[in-house]
Amino acid sequence: MKDSTLQPVLFMVGSMALFSLEDFFIKLLSKTIPASQIMIILGILGSVFFVTAAIVAKQPIISKDLLDKHVIIRTLGDLFGALFFVSAIVLTPLSSASAILQGTPLAVTAGAAIFLRETVGLRRWLAVLIGFIGIILIIKPGVADFSPFSLLAVAAVICLSARDLATRAMSVALPTITISIYAFVALAVAGVLAIPFYGSFVSPGLSECALFMLSISSGVVAYYLIVGATRYGDASLIAPFRYSRLVFAMLLSLFILGERPDLFTWIGASVIVLSGYFIALRERSIKKVER
């Protein structure tokens, strides 16, 4: 792999490692802090950081482009995606929630064909179908140990894929920092919406404050790395490395949280990753032919 392609790949893998760490810290925080409070605090911290960054970089904080319908859909996708995924992390094993989340690129591929009228061939449709079967294996509907809370991760996949599709369709050129501000504002709003479903707020101790700072720091650095990866690397090159997030999540789940995913979860996760990996490689080969 040449140096010109190595850097964006390393950025992508580093970003996925830090995103999985952010999820891990949220899981730890949820033992003593209500999920709604976690989302509000992280949303406020992230918003403050990116507002400060926007001021320093002289980027707009408020823009009329924010009223574009695709920007609004993207923000709503962020809001409900965060609401459902954070809830899934809190209420289900991190390993299964992270595995289901890997279905987002599959949903984006299907959504691009249905809503954006992009051409998706038979092989990619089959890969999407097989990937969705992998999600069903993890959820295990109709089985005794089926948890309805696992559907929260599925809802997150739907919302986050809507966000990504709206991003593809956006015709406005909002700066990344501006979009990031409202992504974190959406996270805080998601926390407000979640208040009725979780316990009363508590006063964080020193350990919880440290976890909050570690979580938001991981998320912010991860965001910058993924922006760097997408800016300097071809999308078809770096897409397969998104699945490294599941590897990091599984390692944290197994060796620190002590989770023991069952056979169906392992098989389902493998099916999802292989299906997504095939789609990414297929899209890369199609782009090469088009060039």
Image: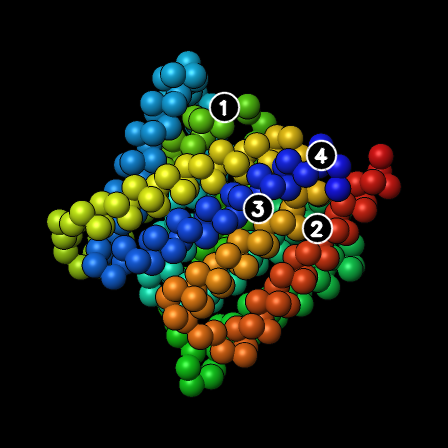
Give x and y (percent) for residue 73: 47, 39
Instruction: Count residues near mark 3 (Cα–Cα under 10 Å), then give few for <14, some for 14-19, many for 20+.
Output: many
Instruction: Count residues near mark 1 (Cα–Cα under 10 Å), then give few for <14, some for 14-19, many for 20+.
Output: few
Q: Sequence order check: which comes first, mark 1 or mark 4?
A: 4
Is 66 drawn above or below residue 131 in the view shown? above
Residue at x 46% of width, y 46% of height: 18
Gap in angstroms between the C-alphas marked 4 and 2? 21 Å
Give x and y (percent) for residue 155: 45, 58
For disc 4, the marked residue is: 3
**SS at mark 3 in the image:** helix
Three-letter code, disc 2 = Ala
Q: Sequence order check: which comes first, mark 3 or mark 2?
A: 3
**SS at mark 4 in the image:** helix
Residue 13's label in the rendered image is 3
For disc 2, the marked residue is: 280
Gap in angstroms between the C-alphas marked 1 and 4? 28 Å
Q: Quadrant of residue 179?
A: top left
Left or right: where 170 falls relative to 96: right
**SS at mark 2 in the image:** helix
Residue 175's label in the rendered image is 1
Gap in angstroms between the C-alphas marked 1 and 2? 26 Å
Left or right: where 290 falls relative to 264: right
Residue 40's label in the rendered image is none
